Image: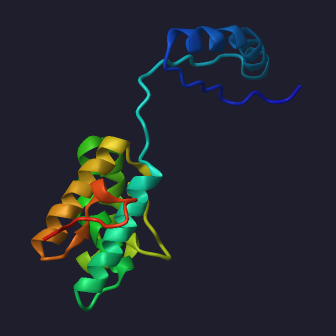
Amino acid sequence: MSKPRDFVCRCSSLKDALAALGRLPSILHQAFTQWGSVDIVVREHVEKRSNDQNRLQRLWCKEAAQQLEGNTAEYWRGYCKYMFGIKILCRDSEDYREACKRVLGPLSHEQRIELMMEPHDYPVTRGMTKPQKSEYLQLMWEFFTGQGVRLTDPSMLGREQYKEAA
């Protein structure tokens, strides 16, 4: 008998949920046989950040690097992860906050930013929900446009001409 895997089913309607429940008895049988006891959890689905949000973050870092002399797009990605992303995740998660204190606490500001960049790439935005990533992008927008950087307006992406914000 193969080891049962976690059973996760995302449902957006009662019909979907009832269909998932139809598959549950055989999954539970396997799980009880293998593990002896299980946790059954029902929780709100929170959407993870989107690929479009990721592309926009990268685009803005590239645009900042082109317009602000002296730093690369990768530097700006690390800078934003440290200055904005860490604050959002630490605010929303005590576990993340404690891990950051342990790992980042003894480092200098420059070392922390370097840790956010490749090749280290400390995990920040990949753990964000869609609303957290939206907040993060808003903070990036405010920071870069406050420095005079003209960023692609996300509402205009995909169009031949896009509006730039001053």
On the picture, is 53 further left or further right than 143? right
Q: Position of residue 4 (x, y in %)?
A: 75, 27
Count of picture labels:
0
Q: Position of residue 46 (x, y in %)?
A: 40, 33
Q: Give the quarter of the image for residue 115.
A: bottom left
Q: Quadrant of the N terminus?
A: top right
Q: Give the quarter of the image for residue 102.
A: bottom left
Q: Nearer the viewer, residue 27 or 62?
A: 62
On the picture, is 131 further left or further right than 149? right
For image coordinates 43% across by 65% down, the residue present is 122
Q: Nearer the viewer, residue 103 or 23?
A: 23
For image coordinates 58% across by 15% down, the residue present is 16
Residue 105 shows in the view: no
For image coordinates 29% across by 65% down, the residue present is 162
Q: Quadrant of the C terminus?
A: bottom left
Residue 143 vertical position relative to residue 125 in the rendered view, above or below: below
Q: Position of residue 140 (x, y in %)?
A: 23, 63
Residue 44 vertical position relative to residue 83 in the rendered view, above or below: above
Q: Nearer the viewer, residue 155 or 145?
A: 155
Residue 110 vertical position relative to residue 43 in the rendered view, above or below: below
For image coordinates 55% across by 25% down, the residue present is 10
Name the outermost residue toward the right: 1
Residue 72 shows in the view: yes
Residue 141 vertical position relative to residue 73 in the rendered view, above or below: above
Q: How are the residues colored? A: rainbow
Name the outermost residue toward the bottom: 70
Q: Position of residue 159 (x, y in %)?
A: 37, 60
Q: Give the quarter of the image for residue 165.
A: bottom left
